[in-house]
Image: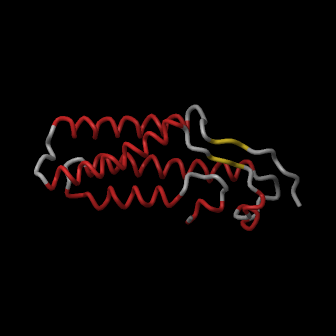
Amino acid sequence: LCITLTVQGLIPCEDILRKGVLFVVCVCLPFSVPLTVVILSRDAVLIGASFYLRYTTLPPPRTWSRYWDIQRSTLRVTPSPLSKLNTLLQLSTVGLSLGAALVNASHHPLLQALWVTTAVSTVMSGASYLIQMKGFKILRKRRSN
């Protein structure tokens, strides 16, 4: 599960990697660069916030080995319904955009509306994690051993 296995419940890294690879591979499509930047930026910010929260909730002494010790989990991240919808939109965007490219319909207004909807839901999903702290749950602080 990559890096995120070490912080129990963090946004699954395989999901982030899968979406990231799909969008980066789609560079030839019209939506690709701006939408890929939005999606990958959101994921990078959420991973950074998770690392920061993990660090700040870890009881002293904060050492490298204690930080990566999954037995000392102090943070759980659970996806919100908006985040799950956003993942569905992102994967649908990739699939439909690739299909549209095959039939030369990449500039169809409904497809472009899907790109905008996906970008907006990505920003809203990231904001719900960061501003409202939805999805981040700080677990009971454990005594240091």
Front-most of 74 and 90? 90
Q: Is residue 92 left or right of residue 123?
A: left
Q: Position of residue 10 (x, y in %)?
A: 60, 52
**Quadrant location of the N terminus in the rendered image:** bottom right
User: Going 30% across and 51% down the picture, which residue do you hit?
Assistant: 94
Q: Is residue 28 left or right of residue 75?
A: left
Residue 2, position in %: x, y?
55, 66
Residue 116 falls in image quadrant: top left
Identified at 29% across, 52% down, the residue is 95
The percent position of residue 25, horizontal first and vertical second, equals 29, 62
Tell me the residue at 46%/56% (across/down): 16
Taking 77 as reference, is 25 left or right?
Answer: left
Q: Nearer the viewer, residue 58 or 121?
A: 121
Name above or below for residue 82 compared with residue 60: above
Tell me the quarter of the image containing the C terminus: bottom right
Q: Residue furthest top?
A: 132
| Residue 127 image position (x, y, % from top left) | 50, 35
- The residue most toward the bottom is 65
Residue under the point 23% across and 49% down: 97
Q: Quadrant of residue 107?
A: top left
